[in-house]
Amino acid sequence: MFVDVDYPPLMERKVRMIEDTEALRSLLPSFRKATPAASDNPLQGLGLLADSENYLPIGCDLRNLDLLSKVLEDRLKLNEGPCAVAVLFVAEVSVAYMERSASQSVLEWASRYEDVRFCLLEQHLPDGADHPFAQTMLAHFQKLRTPLNAIGTMGEMRSRFEKAGWPRNGIDLRTLWEVWRDETFVSLGERARLDSIEPFDEWEELALFGSHYFLMIATKREGIYDVVTDNGNETAVPSQSSKDKSTSGPPLFSRALHGPQRNRRFGALIPSSADGSSDSIGLHAGLGTKEREHDCTTHVRYSNKSPIDGPPTRFGIMCHTITRIGNTSDLLFVGGRASPEKASASCWLRQSGEWKQVQDLPEGRYRHCTVPFEAVSNDPAVVVFGGKNSKGQILDSWLIWTAKTGWTPLEVESQVNDPALISARFGAAATSFIDIHGRFEGVMIGGMDTSGQTRGDARRFALNPDGKLKVQGWNIEMESRLEPPAHTLARFGAQLVTWKSKLLLIGGVTADNLLTRETEIIDITSTTKIPLRGPRPMLVGTNILGLDEGLLVLGGGATCFSFGTYWNTSCVLTTNQELETAWHVLAKSELPNTQSQSLLEEGTASNASYPSPVSIQRRHISSQREFEEILQTGKPVILTGHSIGACTAAWTPTYLKDHIGADRAVVVHRSPTQKMDFQTKNFSYRTQSFSSFIDAIEHQGDRLYLRALSMDSPGEKPTTLANDFPSIAQDFRLPDELAYVQDNAHSSPLRISGPVTMWLHYDVMANVLCQIQGRKRLLLFPPSDVTRLGFKAGASSSSIDLFSEDPNHEQELLARYPGLARAQPHEALLEAGDILFIPSLWLHTAAPTGGLSVAVNVFFRNLKSAAYAAGRDVYGNRDLAAYEKGRKDVDRVIKAFDDLPSDVRNFYLSRLGMEMLERAVDA
């Protein structure tokens, strides 16, 4: 029997809902509403609103317990004392709304029954009412005029139950954060399945919410539960255990920064480009009030500082890192994410105050650790560990970056036989320092592993002379002085900050308990707690810098369940209670090259130059899964060391003429200049024998180019090497690791060219370009550069010449296409046997660097078939169905404004255009 008890007006609405809902009535076949005139319902006046075999709705003010007792005794024969009925009382966020004296009476009343259990889900205040989450929660209920009158601590709730007659060892009391981590409630498999349904990255917010709610189960049977007598979880501020050998240092006080502030969290700090300057700092990107940000807010101590710019990222990003390179003032931007399933592999280098894009990570990652280091070669370096990728996989790889080598995997040597020391994790805290021998050493603490557990271990790591990374545990000395270590070290989303020769572990969330004002900041070198006094920031999603006067805390905050979002006011945490900080926000540093601006406002400085290309990563893969990860990352990669068959050795000019047929007629492009231009059609088509075509390139250097077509139906069917060149097809094969390409192949054209440049264009289908003979240079640009490179509306090619050697050509190009200065060129130099993966819509142009070049392209579908336009697609570059339809829709929208004055028409069409661009950036 389920007995539903609440205020009479609410219960009357429930009864009406049951009466009006067939699905509910079918579950309660004997349900009948009580009426005042019903002679068979003597309990009507006592709050029994209806009756059924398994459901009783009772309208009752719980301050009138005599009435409730009468109903239960008369209807259920539930008399006090021994009886055959077991009772489970369930109270979900209800006792806290009552006055404390009234709610205490309920606990006492419930304890009078013999075979009884009480399950209570309730809010509590683990660190007082001034904790930022608690402030937000209490203000929410106060605003609704439903204040939490009886809220307290878990320890107080246990005492109240004991006082009401419940035995101490019959009470189990845990926070929801503890319950979440208990596999008897939620198994590891269930947690993993939840993450596969919807990617999740709000762990700090889940921990804060779960730490402010508790689940209590009480029973009259003694000895059911073990009782922890010194549980810091149950007190407002955990008392210092007699076992805790740590001490407390001078407290810190918060002093707010002056001026208007930009709310953002999970950004990254950008130091000033001035060497050694600590008078200005930028807070870059992160999650803002409405969306992920892409710009940088500059914070300064004095007013005569310039705004600090971040890298020109194409979209808002968060959970990225910006790290000094070695002991220099150069910076490296690494990774981050848009949404949790869109990890970024992008990397940017700041040198002499200028940002340029450099080699991408092997795969996108966010919530990773990056620290300055020094390579074995003594070159300044950055070491990266862990993080999460777009598939939600937690990474265990270590990488090192230098300007000379780009990204290189690090082999790890563990000093002790403990696999956990190098286990995969994300959200750890890390830093590095120079030891007494002048060598870089790193420290890493906490993070979350693949089982969803927050790690409590600390690690130290350094590079051996042989280039291997030595990792060793750092727990023994910590555990000897600081207890319980799990509570202080097992953190997720914390930071390690150097301040006044101290190494501070700051903020984040822990595996078990809520961090309090006493334990949020720990000096791990001396195991000293540094307490916070007075108003304090929420140390989640913040970025912290150690200064002479204190700790500069920028940004941060969290969404507090359904209660609202708490945003920090940036501040300085200082031991000087009277400090008046001079730090303030200088200005919003708007980058000139956000995507929406670049599409409409492509102005550039008069001294702008064509950006240097980024070398495309070269790598060897060993599994189909690795290639599919490359596909998901969506960045070009050169695959090396893979066999593509006998063709790389066999396909000499003589062999090709013998096997294809010297007299076979082929249609080739003939160009009078080195650059072919599809827009102006500066070339002609010529039909000639295959032998004369090869000889003209090999012996005369003619500017000829063959892109094979289908022999049977050149205007109807895409070409394949097997169908159109069967005599040489057996010489070429894709590596097994590229099975996805083979399984989804659209076409495989043979390409043979002389000293002629292919026009800049994009292909809608992704493809792999397999270089077989000769060498080739390609320039590639991301799809976001399409508006900077002279592509007309609806065109898939551009007339821009990016290979001209004319010394004046660069400035002429920039004058005609000013947006080119902000483009992101990527360069590929292909040798025979190399395979270049070209993602869908990446703009590219190619030129041989020698004589004859022979290659095979394999185009393949990497989108759902419904995305591609219906009908013929001979070349694999017909635009997607949505785009073709969209262009027709654009025509209709423009025509709708035809009858308006031109200024009105331009005004509204410009606004619509901007709206589309903003939505494109948001998406």
Image (spheres, grey):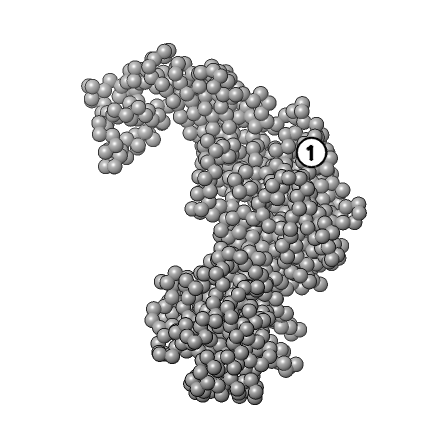
x, y percent for residue 195 = 46, 44
x, y percent for residue 159 = 52, 19
Residue 642 appears in view: yes
Q: Quadrant of the N terminus?
A: top left
- Direction right: furthest residue: 437
Secondary structure beneath dot 1 equals helix
Image quadrant of residue 806? bottom right
Q: Nearer the viewer, residue 761 or 176?
A: 761
Image quadrant of residue 55? top left
509 lies above or below 46: below
Which residue in the structure is indicated by mark 1?
Answer: 476
x, y percent for residue 862 = 43, 62
Three-letter code for the amino acid on which mark 1 is drawn: Ile
> With 418 as the anchor, is 375 left or right in this view?
right
Q: Nearer the viewer, residue 331 or 815?
A: 331
Going 56% across and 41% down the picture, which residue do you hit? 448
612 lies above or below 853: above
Going 39% across and 60% down the picture, which residue do you hit? 864
- Direction top: furthest residue: 81
Q: Nearer the viewer, residue 879 or 28?
A: 879
Q: How many marks?
A: 1
436 lies above or below 889: above
> With 289 as the anchor, is 729 left or right in this view?
left
Q: Badge 1: how crowded within 10 Å, few (<14), some, or many (20+)?
A: few
Going 52% across and 32% down the picture, which residue do you hit? 178
Residue 772 appears in view: no
Q: Nearer the viewer, residue 9 or 313?
A: 313
Going 55% across and 23% down the picture, which residue do you hit? 155
x, y percent for residue 480 = 70, 30
